[in-house]
Amino acid sequence: MGFRGVCFDKDNTLTEPYKDDVYEPYKKSIDLCLEVFGRDKVAIISNSAGSSDDTDFKKAQQIESSLGMHVIRHGTKKPDGIDQVSAHFNTTPDRLIMVGDRYLTDILFGNLYGMLTIFTKPITSNGDNPMVKLIRNKEHQFVQYSKQFYQPPLQPLFKPGIYFKK
Ligand SMILES: [Mg+2]
């Protein structure tokens, strides 16, 4: 389709919340993704590892060695951090994909800058940040309500229906 890279959120997208290993049932798919697209085309942008919460980016280094994926250091929180993402992939955001489990962080971040966004169901509520647990339902309700009035943004490179044949 012309996309140049994929950004994954970490917590509750690739790993259980605040864990350092890929969620076991996803391991084969993630390995295949890295093999097919190449490690330089896949990275993590997280609001824990590599963010303003990650002193000296120690968590980012730890995640990189356990997951084998680059963690983008942004020193902020999504929806900030787009400059570091563009710099990492050396392209504009409209040629990137954002995959994540939160509307208010991952999906808002991607849509703000014209990325193709892919919303995933969270892996588990076990160990999730209590505030996130509280907000998640509200985000979901708000998005469902908003669907009456708004359409998701169109992503110029994405042509639904063409690429997903049975
Ligand atoms: Mg998450």
Image: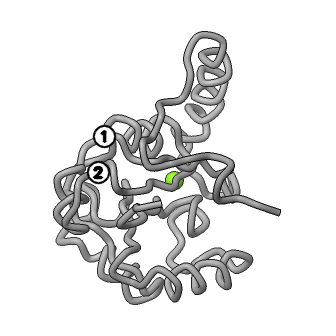
Left or right side of 34 for 147: right
Q: Secondary structure at mark 2?
A: helix
Left or right side of 164 for 34: left
| Residue located at (59% from left, 33% from top) | 134
Between 164 and 99, the one lying in front of the other is 164
Q: Quadrant of residue 38?
A: bottom left
Left or right side of 158 for 149: right
Which of marks 1 and 2 precedes in the sequence? 2
| Residue located at (60% from left, 35% from top) | 136
Q: Quadrant of residue 98?
A: bottom left
Residue 90 lies, with reference to residue 120, above or below; the image says below
Residue 88 lies, with reference to residue 104, above or below; the image says below
How far across and how far down the image is residue 25, in percent?
74, 77
Q: Does label 1 point to a residue whose CB lies under 8 Å from ligand 1?
A: no
Q: Quadrant of the C terminus?
A: bottom right
How far across and how far down the image is residue 43, in percent?
37, 71
Q: Secondary structure at mark 1?
A: loop
Left or right side of 17 for 106: left
Which residue position is annotated with label 1? 113
Which residue position is annotated with label 2? 93
